[in-house]
Image: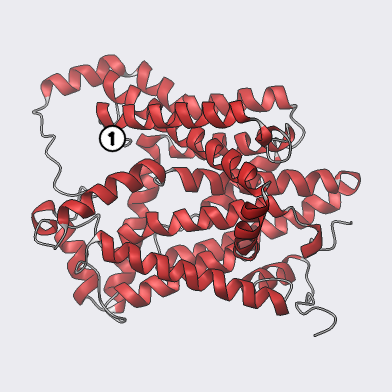
Amino acid sequence: MTSNQPIEPKQRIEILDILRGFALLGIIFMNMGFFSGYVFMPFDELKQITNFQLDEKLYSFLDIIVTGKFYTLFSILFAVGFYIQYEKNKEDSINFLKTYRRRLFFLLLIGFLHSLIWFGDILLAYSIFGFILILFRNVKSKNLILWSLFFLLFPLLIDLSLLPFSEALSSASPENTTAIAHVHYPDKTGEAVISTFQNGSIADIFFLNIHNLVWKYLGYIPSGGYFKFLGIFLLGYYFASIELFTKKSKSTLLLITSLTVGLLATFSAKIIGGSSYMFPSTLSNILFKFLLLAGQIFMCVFYVTSIFKIFQTSIGRRAFKYLIPVGRMALSNYLFQTIIMIIIFYNFGFNLIGKIGLLPTSCIAILILVSQIILSNIWLRHFKFGPLEWIWRSLTYKKRINIRYQNN
């Protein structure tokens, strides 16, 4: 294979496409809380919604198994994809890297446009950190894990160094730990956010999305998100270099260990309580951040190893084969999820934002996922790539890629 040709479907690694499809299943549940307005609604209003207690239990359940874990998995898989492509094209690495940088540039454009309508976009950040990941392409495995740990833990080291100042500030400031909503902004109430989505013009919604986008990227500063992004990318590159996704995932010990540590860390973080955005942080909150990070990474490893083991069985292979097309069309499915949810929840669509609880919202998510599984399988019976994957590849390789199979 040369760097001047896209990877054909038959050359792809099935387990990676399954994991990408699986990651998309979790991401939609993470995003639905924001699109539906559930996380912005004040608790006093949420209590007026039918089945509030069940909604909160579901929110806690998703917080344990979904929040942070599936974006981490998606990030790791992005780095794994680069590793595989780079290794296959090492003999022509100069041309490959030129093509790959062009690929990242167009992903950056797609992510930028997507972020203008959905502040939760991840593609823009992926493309930026993808450029940085290239710089580590020839680092040895034993050093990769050290670099990864450094970037993952660096924000916590900063918190520790500022601990004396944070303790002084906390003692001088009045305590106000009462949460008014699951998510809120310093300069805008949840009611204002919901009201704009329900009653604002398209321009109002656009500028609110930009507002939320700005706060998301500002939030990466106290949470250390920028360093953790790079750390997770390097971790994915390291996992690929030690063949975690092809050989080491067979380990039962790794499966049990990752599940045990992941759950213990996640539950411990919930018991301790804290905020990823507290800066400077208290000692208790630093521990919370560390446990939260450990839970995300180890649960992610558990998902990888458990899916790999299930896929080795005949029943698992038959079940998971339907996720392969979803993973092959990850870009299209991810962006179409945004379009569908905007139509369902925003006021120029069905205007359901702030009007239904998490249970019916999750049912909508399940319907969307089932539809995407069915449509992805149908689409890839006739075409090699998803529609947006085809556009992306054609731009990357500066030619019109043949999307149809030869017999079509």
Of all residues, the one furthest to the bottom in this rendering is 408
Report the front residue among 166 and 55.
Answer: 55
Residue 70 on image: x %, y % = 48, 47
Packing grade of label 1 (10 A; few <14, some 14-19, many >=20) is: some
Instruction: Pick whichever, 89 or 54, lies toward us.
Output: 54
x 55%, y 69%: residue: 373
In the rendered image, residue 167, in percent from the top left (x then y), is placed at 21, 17
How many numbered badges does the structure rendering display?
1
Place residue 301 in its image quadrant: top right
Asked if residue 369 can be seen in this view, the reply is yes
5 over 226 or under it: above or below: below
**Residue nearer the viewer, 182 or 106:** 182
Q: Quadrant of residue 207?
A: bottom left
Which quarter of the rendering shows the C terminus? Answer: bottom right
Task: Answer above or below: position of 297 versus 93.
Answer: above
Q: Position of residue 389 (x, y in %)?
A: 66, 68
Residue 108: image location, x then y, percent: 58, 59
Q: Is residue 366 left or right of residue 16?
A: left
Quadrant in the rendering for residue 357 = bottom left
Q: What colouring does the structure picture have?
A: secondary structure
Q: Amino acid at mark 1?
A: Ser
Mark 1 sits on what residue?
275
- Give the structural element (helix, strand or loop) at label 1: loop
Apparent side of residue 31 relative to residue 270 in the rendered image (left or right): right
Report the residue at 71% width, 70% height from top.
Answer: 395
Instruction: Determine whether 281 is above or below 103 in the image.
Output: above
